[in-house]
Image (spheres, rainbow, N blue to C red):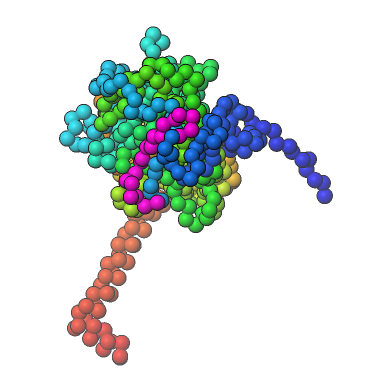
Amino acid sequence: MSVPPIQERKPVKDMQKVFHYTDTMSRKPTRDNDPYEYITGFGNRHQSEVIPGTLPAGQNNPQEPRFGLYTEGITYSAFAAPRHANFSTYMYRVRPAAAHNGYKANIPNKADIENCFLSINPKVATLAEQGEWAPFPLPKDDEKIDFVDGMHTVGGSGDPNLREGIALHVFMANTDMDHRAFCNTDGDFLIVAQLGNLDIQTELGKMFLQPGEVCVIPRGIRFAIRLGPGHDVARGYITEIWGSRFELPDLGPLGGHGLANPRDFLHPVAFIDENLHEDWSIVNKNNGQYHAIEQDHSPFDLVAWHGNVVPYKYDLTKFASQNATTIDHTDPSVNCVLTAPSRDPVTPLVDFLWFGPRWDVASNTFRLPYFHRNSATEFLACLYGSGLGRSDKFLPGGGSVEISHTPHGNFSDAYVYEMRNQVNEPRKILENQMTIMIESSRSFLFTEYARSGCGTFNDQGTDPKAWDALPDKFSSYPHIQEILKQVKADKEARKQRLETYYDDDRLAALVLQLGQ
């Protein structure tokens, strides 16, 4: 018996071409061009220090921290919250955040931010049907837009003052945040890079974010976003949540491993600016409004920290996909990367989902998503490749939305092929592409920017001609009318037989007849 020749793996270095991160054959937890070091693990209490021995031993607030530093704490939860829900971080910094030169309210900006998604707000409205956006427009070459000015709200539900809700934003930037930092006091940011690399500096250290990676910055943490080397423009998506926090979904019968594994989440290590005594502006987003704190020192002056209110990032190419291996399409919950609980214990506020390369191996079944009217609102965005949108207008950098209970489903040539093809051969699907979904139990309201201001929105729904590929085959099925007549006659006969048991006279006559 001849043995086939041994095939050797070769590393794939284009991250938009990998089937999984392991195709890179890298021994590092980060992509080759990521310049930073990280701490691994999700949900831990971490610690990091620039100068070894800076962190106090056995206590949080020494009488005099080493090197003349100041102790500063940040809390994320109630002081008496249960241990599993108690979040705080201690920071040891050159100057406390309280040392500043005062506030400026409602500073001028070019952003388009909305925070109140309640029916009483006339600036937001529902969508009557499906919606789709072509790629959100990038800044013009003759204007300099950083992350602060380049953020625009698409839609959401709830209000940050109620401590419950969600907002979707997009951001487009072509310049660095220069001597100004951003602080969101309303909620947590889940940032997704779609175009361009992002160099993100936070109080607790630096992270490098590329298309196909996501990061979470907790409420109250200061950060600055700059463009990565060789990139002159960036675009991405932000999911902001109020009154909740992102968690890893439970795995149930999957066991201890699968989907997004805790060890693949990376947290920054402590980093201190070289130039500490320069003028800075800290832009605070509070109740959807921009205010600023002016100060004469860098906000990135931490020498050490410890705690669990820490930014983190995750590479979506590491997702350990699970799927049906015999029959039937699996619910998209199996693609959940992160989830944020709501006040309803069985319904999350939002799930953040991944759709990337995987094997499709189910047999004797229709493998594509069936037509559905889910209770959730679904926002889809393509990061690269062809994506999973409703039409050929669904391009990287755009998006589409299906409001809760909106009927939708696939109607492409692939759908027709799946119905007619008799052999469900194993195959790789969604290669060289990455799509994300923000799925929420809420019904969204959308901003004027999303409905008209961005200039890329299409609310005309699906072209009815698309459904010509899915005709009514039932009505033309051979002898279907005769079958229906027979079913009706059988039903009437069955009804008459059963009526006998509810009529004493008829039942007695039946018994007499049977006795003869």
Query: In the rendering, at what x and y percent does residue 460 appear?
Result: 30, 29
Which of the two residues, 174 or 63, is positioned nearer the viewer here?
Answer: 63
Which quadrant of the rendered structure holds the C terminus? Answer: bottom left
Choose between 474 and 170: the one closer to the eye.
170
- Answer whether residue 32 is magenta in the image: no
72 in the magenta segment: yes
* Residue under the image location 35 percent in, 20 percent down: 295
User: What residue is shown at x 64% (from left), y 34% (from top)?
Assistant: 26
Residue 347 versus residue 169 in the image, above or below = below
Rendering coords of residue 130 (x, y %): 32, 35
Residue drawn at (80%, 45%) of the image: 3
Q: Say whether residue 372 is visible.
A: no
- Figure check: 235 above or below 481: above
- Residue 292: image location, x then y, percent: 30, 22
Task: Identify the residue shown where x is 36% and y is 28%.
Answer: 97
Extreme-right residue of the structure: 1
Q: Which residues are magenta?
A: 65-83
Depth check: 128 or 350 in front?
350
